[in-house]
Image: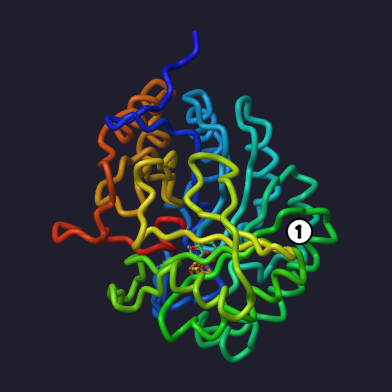
């Protein structure tokens, strides 16, 4: 008998799982992590076996795509082996990865061989000093080498993610767009969300997708809206008539909660129904106390049933989650 799909109280069916594989990172982006970060003890993070077990239970409930994230997922030495296990789970159609690209030059090929489908690389600046100002560590040359290696390894449809923050990233928009058009990467701008560890987010710092689009149209040329590749996708995609595309993920100015199909598993084994959820469901405890798959199914269903209609960033009742982006998994 096939299990009932993961449908919440608002009719949203969940088919996508974001798995954070670590909270550790080799950068310290100001919009994500504190400079004086304290990471979780290693024994609190799920092992590859534990991740694969939970992912298998999710797949049995209708999850079809998995995206690995973190922290920086390439920091985990067992990542290619984990990808291989996840790709082999019946029902999983695609395993994708979001990375800062610093370690990609060495790992692109093993990851491709392991069956990794899609690759998102986060990059906010093409200037060494701009990169270091945002990421609070150097590394631009390594990211560019990683991107070249990814192409060489055969990845296609590589996406570049850039966060949009007034003043901090504004001057990077046009150079990034020109670079991505030239290199054949699909660029996506993401509005700055209240998930920075320093809790410095303020609505006035959010550079909206509409503002970024206006800058691109003024400096490069008119953009034409594309039909969405899949209905659940948060991005609104556009293309230039003479080639190249750009997408906008606008969680602050244009929330896409009504079509959200995502669930999350944190590196320390907590199941979440939203980036902004203030509640988590503890799968690690079940895993480590001998819980069977039926108990994990019940936990996942409880989590889905409790999903709120929307994150409500723009409402007075909005409450920031206690954990920051690097601890949840973006
Ligand atoms: N370390 C990897 C990376 O940077 O791609 C994966 C994890 S990172 C948390 C995932 C994505 O979240 C990145 O594209 C990053 O730019 C984005 N991100 C982090 N903090 C953010 C925030 N406060 N608002 C919007 N996007 C954010
Ligand atoms: Fe690390 Fe990614 Fe967060 Fe930057 S956004 S600090 S690269 S986890």
Residue drawn at x 71%, y 75% as measured from the top left: 179
The residue depicted at 58 percent of the width and 43 percent of the height is 48
Q: Secondary structure at mark 1?
A: helix
> Depth check: 293 or 199 in front?
199
Query: Which residue lies most toward the top here?
Result: 1
As drawn, 166 above or below 65: below
Percent of width and height locating residue 247:
56, 60
Q: Nearer the viewer, residue 25 or 234?
A: 234
- Left or right of 290 in this view: 101: right
Label 1 near ligand 1 (CB < 8 Å): no
Residue 18 or 103: which is nearer the viewer?
18
* Picture quadrant of residue 262: top left
232 to the left or right of 81? left
- What's the residue at 52%, 40% (across, down)? 51
Q: Pick the residue in front: 147 or 183.
A: 183
Badge 1: residue crowd in 10 Å (few <14, some 14–19, many ≥20): many
Quarter location, residue 203: bottom left
Please say which color scheme the image uses. Answer: rainbow
Q: Is residue 32 above or below residue 290?
A: below
Q: Which residue is mark 1?
A: 108
Q: Residue at x 74, y 67 (%)?
A: 147
Residue 117 point in image, percent of width and height? 70, 45
Left or right of 246, for residue 2: left
Residue 321 image position (x, y, % from top left): 27, 58
């Amino acid at each position: 008998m096939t299990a009932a799909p993961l449908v919440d109280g608002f009719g949203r069916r969940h088919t996508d799982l974001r798995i954070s594989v670590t909270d550790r990172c080799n950068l310290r982006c100001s919009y994500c992590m504190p400079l004086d970060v304290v990471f979780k003890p290693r024994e609190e993070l799920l092992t590859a076996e534990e991740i694969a077990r939970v992912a298998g239970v999710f797949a049995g409930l209708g999850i079809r795509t998995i995206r690995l994230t973190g922290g920086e997922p390439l920091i985990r030495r067992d990542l290619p082996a984990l990808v291989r296990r996840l790709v082999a789970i019946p029902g999983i159609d695609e395993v994708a990865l979001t990375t800062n690209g610093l370690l990609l030059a060495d790992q692109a090929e093993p990851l491709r061989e392991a069956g990794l489908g899609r690759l998102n690389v986060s990059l906010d600046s093409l200037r060494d000093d701009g990169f270091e100002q945002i990421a609070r560590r150097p590394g631009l040359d390594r990211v560019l080498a990683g991107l070249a290696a990814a192409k060489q390894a055969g990845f296609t449809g590589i996406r570049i993610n850039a966060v949009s923050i007034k003043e901090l990233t504004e001057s990077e928009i046009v150079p990034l767009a020109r670079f991505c058009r030239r290199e054949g990467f699909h660029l996506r701008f993401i509005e700055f969300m209240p998930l920075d560890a320093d809790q410095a987010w303020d609505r006035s710092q959010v550079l909206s997708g509409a503002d970024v689009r206006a800058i691109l149209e003024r400096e490069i040329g008119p953009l034409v809206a594309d039909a969405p590749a899949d209905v659940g996708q948060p991005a609104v995609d556009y293309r230039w008539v003479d080639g190249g595309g750009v997408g906008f993920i606008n969680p602050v100015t244009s929330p896409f909660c009504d079509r959200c199909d995502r669930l999350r598993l944190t590196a320390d084994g907590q199941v979440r129904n939203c980036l902004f959820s203030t509640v988590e469901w503890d799968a690690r405890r079940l895993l480590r106390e001998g819980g069977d798959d039926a108990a994990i199914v019940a936990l996942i269903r409880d989590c889905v049933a409790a999903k709120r209609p929307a994150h409500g960033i723009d409402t007075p009742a909005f409450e920031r989650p206690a954990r920051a982006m690097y601890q949840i998994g973006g």
